Image (cartoon, rainbow, N blue to C red):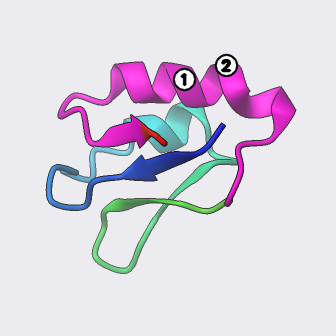
Amino acid sequence: MKVKVNQDACIGCGACMSIADDVFEMDDQGLSSVKVSEVPEGSVDQAKEALESCPTGAIEEE
């Protein structure tokens, strides 16, 4: 599974990081970014939960 963050839609709330901190991080602008090229097997459920929990829908599965 691969995910990406639409930087134009991200508000930097940090919900994704609190759910899947091994997949998401905050960049220098305070917005979420993906820190792995492929979501690790053990983190797929958390990545999907983060995607579904994003208040602006900024996270997308590729």
Image quadrant in which the N terminus is located: top right
Marks 2 and 1, Cα distance to the nearest angstrom? 5 Å
> Mark 2: which amino acid?
Asp
Residue 51, given in percent of the width and then of the height, sits at 42, 28
Magenta span: 37-60
Residue 19, given in percent of the width and then of the height, sits at 55, 30
Residue 33 higher or lower than 1, as above or below: below
Residue 35 higher or lower than 27, as above or below: above
> Mark 1: which amino acid?
Lys
Quarter assignment of residue 37: bottom right
Identify the residue shown where x is 84% and y is 29%: 42
Mark 1, secondary structure of its residue: helix
Along the horizontal axis of the image, is 2 left or right of 15? right
Along the horizontal axis of the image, is 43 left or right of 59? right
Residue 35, given in percent of the width and then of the height, sits at 61, 62
- The residue tagged 1 is 48
Residue furthest to the front: 62
Neighbour tally class for label 2: few under 14, some 14-19, many 20 plus, Cα within 10 Å: some
- The residue tagged 2 is 45
Assess whether mark 1 and mark 2 are in contact (beta carbons under 8 angstroms): yes
Residue 61, given in percent of the width and then of the height, sits at 47, 36
Mark 2, secondary structure of its residue: helix
Identify the residue shown where x is 37% and y is 80%: 28
